[in-house]
Amino acid sequence: MESLVESSMVNRNLHYAPDYVELVERALQTALTATPAYASWRRFERSAVPANVFLHLAALPALTKRELRDYGPAGFVPAGRNLGQALASGEVELVQTSGTTSDQVTNVWYQRWWNECEANSWQLNRYAREAATGSHREAILTSPLCSGVPCEEALLPPAERHIGRFLFLSERVDPRTWDDALMARMVSEINAYQPVLLEANPSFLAILARYILRSGAAVYRPHLITFTYENPSLIHYRLIGRAFGAPLASSYGATEAGYVFMECEYGRLHQVCRNVHVDFLPFRAEHGGPLVGQLLVTTLTNPWRALLRFDIGDLARLAEEPCSCGIDEGLTLAGIEGRTINLTYAPNGRAVTQGEIDRALAQVAGLVEYQLLQSAPEEYGLSLVVEGAAPAATADEARGRLQTLYGAQAKVSAEVVQAIAPDPPGKYRLVKSVLARDTSALLEPRYAPPVLEE
Ligand SMILES: [Zn+2]
């Protein structure tokens, strides 16, 4: 009997709905035989691998943002569909992802598909299942450049931030500009609107949560709070849980791929099998594998965008046991381990994920925000925001925990700051590294994708 972890490597012996294999097979064939961007992939002949769609997928390269840019949106539209016509009729539109300039990708955006994907994700969490109908009231707190109505010069009345069933709580990109009056306004608007769901960038909502906790303001308790836009820190869960007393769930996806995993009421992330297939590529044991690895996402139902083995840019940790919620379809994750570009390295070369750093720092009492920068192979600088009477002791404890994580060779510094700045377009990066290492070397070679020749 294979363990859940071994099964997850090649999606073997995992539970799937009866039509799942057919959906994956169809997505694979549509991409390989009818989508321009995959012309060079056709040489990865099926005859060379066993007759199993998961093993066939495993023999294919990974799709990166570079290919998405090189081929453009039209390169991923399957044959027989007229993109020009659909754009003209308004059925689809082109949207740019909110990455940095070098990272931006233009996607064909098909709202109907997106809504279906979101509704599928709600089925995987008890509280979302109970309350999310698609017509429920939703409040959103994130950078307005990601979603909402940006305005830096003035404060907008609620009517200008209330669109359909959504109320956007902030018009400001940088939470460092929020004063108590603005946060009091957010609380009173939540209380008046009584959202069923509060969807938030966890960094943004944690700052509001700290205001609620220190001011003692009474705040309405939504049926569920979902985190998107960023991978939440354990510190965010703790602060937001204390301030709101509501169930919390991370909703994980990407503009390119839709909704990919949803956190259930037991804290595990379940694959949204109606939307996507996910290949898990384990790291070598010396880098935290085989439980930690890279995610490649194949979209199953988007008629306007055939993505095969798309490197979504995140690392994950597999769950070792079946989840208590009873959902056993597809991959189950213990958590997202952070962005691949946010990987740091110990002086001995071991990869250290954002998740590891977060688990170490979350235990430090009084630490409410942080950012770690690896500036050289042996140098790590922590900036931290502290609440409480002993900031120096808090900084010292945080530094000590990082020293233990990276080893005796590491030079770790810790500096208490007033606030931490988000990166454009309003996303926090809790960990950064100047080391640009080829992460394919971290993968267990048996599962590493073949590399496309130029
Ligand atoms: Zn579960």
Image (spheres, helix red, strand yellow):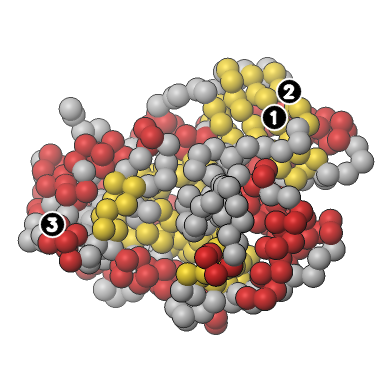
- Tell me the residue that label 3 is attached to: 84
- Tell me the residue that label 1 is attached to: 382
- Please name whichever residue, 262 or 423, is drawn nearer the observer in this view of the structure: 423
Lower sequence index among marks 2 and 3: 3
- Residue visible at 80% across and 40% down? 386
- Tell me the residue that label 2 is attached to: 413
- Please name whichever residue, 208 or 22, is drawn nearer the observer in this view of the structure: 208
Q: Which residue type carries mark 1?
A: Leu
Q: Position of residue 200 (x, y in %)?
A: 58, 59
- Residue visible at 26% across and 39% down? 69
Q: CA distance from mark 3 to mark 1?
A: 49 Å
Would residue 307 be visible to someone looking at this image? yes
Lower sequence index among marks 1 and 2: 1
Outermost residue, left side: 80
Q: How many C-alpha atoms fall within 10 Å of the one at disc 1: few (<14), some, or many (≥20)?
A: many
Q: CA distance from mark 1 to mark 2?
A: 6 Å
Q: How many C-alpha atoms fall within 10 Å of the one at disc 3: few (<14), some, or many (≥20)?
A: few
Disc 2 secondary structure class: strand
Of badges 3 and 1, the one in the foreground is 3
Q: Position of residue 52 (x, y in %)?
A: 22, 57
Disc 3 secondary structure class: helix
Placement of the N terminus among the 4 image quadrants = bottom left
- Contact (CB < 8 A) between labels 1 and 2? yes
Disc 1 secondary structure class: strand
Q: CA distance from mark 2 to mark 3?
A: 54 Å
